[in-house]
Amino acid sequence: MRDLIERLYREHTLPPDKLRILLTQCDEEHLTLIRQKACEVSQKHFGNKIYIRGLIEIGNCCHNDCYYCGIRRSNSHIERYRLAKEDILACCEEGYNLGFRTFVMQGGEDNRLTDSRMIDIISTIRKTYPDVAITLSLGEKDTRTYQQFYEAGANRYLLRHETHNEQHYRLLHPSGMSLSNRLRCLNDLKQIGFQTGTGIMVGSPGQTVDHLIEDILFIESFRPQMIGIGPFLPHHETPFSDRPAGRLQQTLLLLSIFRLMHPQALIPSTTALATLLPEGRELGILSGANVVMPNLSPPQQRYKYALYDNKASMGAEAAEGLKLLDDRLKAIGYAIDKSRGDYFEETTI
């Protein structure tokens, strides 16, 4: 096992049979080792700096009905909301004054959020704050829409593929959605010029080691600039309400694997990880993550963006909690970096 970890550290890749061994036989001792190696690589490229992104959850209305998601169309017990343009701009103003230089606008696939409205919001933010990075996480769109978002001033786009296995994808999504379209979207985003992020839920219902190997190999070939992974967390108003959450150890192992395979990728320590365990954010950073996304959304709306139960959105997970976040990062030897933190092409370690 030690030889496999050293090989991954040196070569940034492993064949599928070796990945299987790593995923199935990594005990606590070797998990500690691979996390140390991942931190070593992360610190080589980024020092002890952790990039912060201001997360703005612009609405929880969605026409999709994904079986794992709390804001799915069929959830009739959720209080829906949409932020007005003025509300979004107020979030940006607050974030900019706090030092954020990246805004992440995230929302459901909302038919009432037309392309023209979104383009207007993006272009206004770009004109008002020309030095910031604008990241979108708004789901599947057609090629022309992505192009218009890019031309309006958006720089980055997050779209997790969730699983690269067709059968597993169908288990998690209704028939109107397809893996082929999700992959088409990701390819469009890269070709247009977005810094593109994808990723998976760890421990999602029906996920197997074979699926994880397929995901690792897909991400290796796709070479995203951002890799977002976090544990599956159930929501009580979904078909998967009784499924167990993804395991912490497996999530940390995969974070470390992705850091060793993609030394310069932007890898968040996710809100889901902080929700799974109070110190989850710190554990993610100590496994190779180098991004956190404090919540800039209006406090009275945050509980409504409930992708899963008990989502962490206050304290060190909130933009107004930057001092607390900074203190917690300092306690593990890291510090906030408020710059844009752009991705640069990888060089050999």
Image (tube, helix red, strand yellow):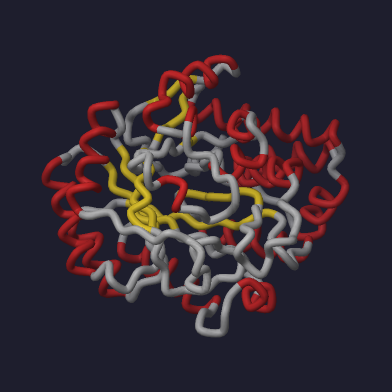
Q: Quadrant of the C terminus?
A: top right
Residue 315 horizontal/vertical position (percent): 48, 28
Image height check: is 85 above or below 34? below
Q: Residue at x 73, y 64 (%)?
A: 207
Left or right, 214 with reference to 327: right
Q: Quadrant of residue 251?
A: top right
Image position, residue 78 (x, y; %): 48, 61
In-image side of 237 versus 325 (left or right) = right
Residue closest to the eye, 275 or 192: 275
Instruction: Decide which of 205, 181 is in the foreground and name it.
Output: 205
- Identify the residue shown where x is 32% and y is 39%: 102
Q: At x 25% / y 33%, what residue is drawn? A: 94
Q: Nearer the viewer, residue 326 or 159?
A: 326
Q: Indicate the position of residue 338 as horizontal and vertical percent values.
A: 35, 28
Q: Residue at x 49, y 69 (%)?
A: 76
Q: Is residue 206 left or right of residue 284?
A: right
Note whether 28 is above or below 213 in the view shown: above
* Residue at the bottom extreme of this rendering: 175
- Quarter of the N terminus within the rendering: top right
Q: How many marks?
A: 0
Which of the two residues, 177 or 192, is positioned nearer the viewer here? 177
Q: Return the x and y of residue 86 as percentages of the image width and height.
A: 17, 49
Q: Is residue 42 above or below residue 189?
A: above
The answer to which quarter of the image holds residue 273 is top right
